Amino acid sequence: MMNALAELPSLEPGYDQGRENFEHIVRYLDSEEASSMSHSDLERELEKRGRELMRILLQEHLEARAAGQCEQPVRGADGVERPRSRLQERKLETVFGAVSVKRVGYSREGTESLHPLDAELNLPDERYSLELRRRVAEEAAKSSFDDTLESIHKTTGGHVPKRQIEELVMRAARDFDAFYEMRQGKPSVGEQESSIVVISVDGKGVVMRRQDLREQTRKAAMEREHKMGARLSRGEKKNAKRMATVATVYTIAPFVREPEDLVAESNSTRAGPPRPRPEQKRVWASLEKPPKEVIEEVFKEASCRDPEGKKKWVALVDGNKSQLRNLRRIAKDKGIDLTIIVDIIHVIEYLWDAGRAFYPEAGSELENWVRRRLLEILRGKAGYVAGGMRRSATLRHLLCAERKPVDACANYLLTYAPYLRYNHYLAQGFPIATGVIEGACRHLVKDRMEVTGARWSLSGAEAVLRLRALRSSHDFDEYWTFHERKEYERNHRSLYANGIVPKTFKPRKLPQTRKRKHLKAVK
């Protein structure tokens, strides 16, 4: 600590208050009070005092910096020169605390003032610094707005009210689409080794404010309230949700398997090779955009992973007919040979429901029934299995209600038979389960949007989903750099003629005359 103190005089002259504050911290550390503290108490106290030191240093740096004077004329985007200059002050809430910035504003009557120093510092157009906004965005993507408020209060010196947190989150996510359009426009840096491109989409409901429900859902909600009155008990969230379209794109290496590898006996000790992991995975979700638009974005994103068209494309779905239509149409329009696979997990769920019609009690008989039919389905015999279970239900004289899950399973197998050719998929090493998209539905949507039980606004929910998607795709840091550039363009560059911000200069300081010490005459 004392070594650091010794180095302070080597800094540029100034920062007197910062030096004084630093020395005060050192004196405190040497005090009896600090010497009697536990380590955790000392950490907390030093963090608090250190944050105030950072705020003072930042404030003194801003004061020592030039006020943003320009030698060249200052013209706005309207082409009008601003000849008048006046020193103006603005407040800024930072991660260290509140500071003020004094800078020259150039104006003309009837026009807005321009502040070149604001552009040089890339200051936001409101009170909260970009770094503080970043902290808010990251926290709000992870937890509720109340938790974000508490976290910002505990870990920074900034003060952001809850209402402003919601607004800052929406501003933080505003460049989401532009960021990925920029990324898609960049040339691919080397082709990925994995030869399979996987795309997948799903839907997940979010409880919304009534004005933000889709029109059909909103009408149904109003009719329901009219029939039932003000009180809603069980099922009150019916007609209260708007579906978010969740999407994922990734590449993966082939993983060739046999049906028997997936349906092994319970006592089998058969061990296979390690399963390949998804690569370059991107996940996202949207409440604003219709499913068709999101699926089109999926194809654009997937094309970036296969710029030369050499990879095999696989779409994993749960059987949603609208999704299937959109996937087939877009693939046809783009000339893509797309293999659509219905998720095996959904098939297994239907099998279990059907099996309980024959064996209501859990046990080995039910497990063996499901295992045998699953094995045949994996061998590409879905139609054979569907017919067999229907005949079995008829031979056992099951009542209509009893055989309902059997017929539902058989209908599912027959309806989606073209997408259940698992023997071919396994032989080519394709994935056949939608674990990635199911995980995205849970992580992106459920784990955040249902955390408080609140009804979301459309703009607020969309912003949070975008920020969570950036974190899940490990793109947040790159996005924020892009976002700050866009903020500069919006808040500064766009205000000046030809998009050029005049350079500022720092006036030369007159050399200070030192008082000479004169020798005193010794009498």
Image (cartoon, helix red, strand yellow):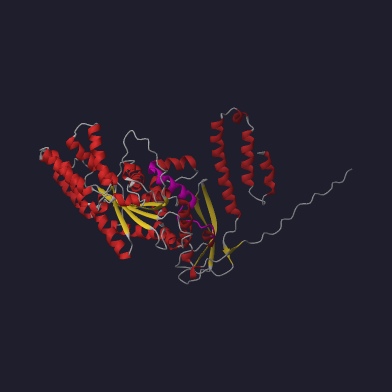
Spot the residue most to the right: 523
Residue 388: percent from left, percent from top: 17, 44
Span of residues in magenta: 120-146
Nearest the camera: 342 or 480?
342
Q: Is residue 403 left or right of residue 510?
A: left
Spot the residue most to the top: 36
The answer to whether residue 244 is visible is no
- Residue appearing at x 32%, y 51% in the figure: 425
Give above or below for 506 relative to 213: below
Residue 333: percent from left, percent from top: 30, 65
Residue 142 in the magenta stretch? The answer is: yes
Nearest the camera: 460 or 372?
372
Magenta region's main secondary structure? helix
Residue 277: percent from left, percent from top: 42, 47
Nearest the camera: 498 or 114?
498
The answer to whether residue 501 is visible is yes
- Residue appearing at x 37%, y 35% in the figure: 269
Q: Which quarter of the figure has residue 49? A: top right
Quarter of the image containing the C terminus?
A: top right
- Residue appearing at x 21%, y 47% in the figure: 239
Residue 318: percent from left, percent from top: 27, 49
Give above or below for 466 relative to 390: below
Quarter of the image containing the N terminus?
A: top right
Q: Is residue 449 left or right of residue 239?
A: right
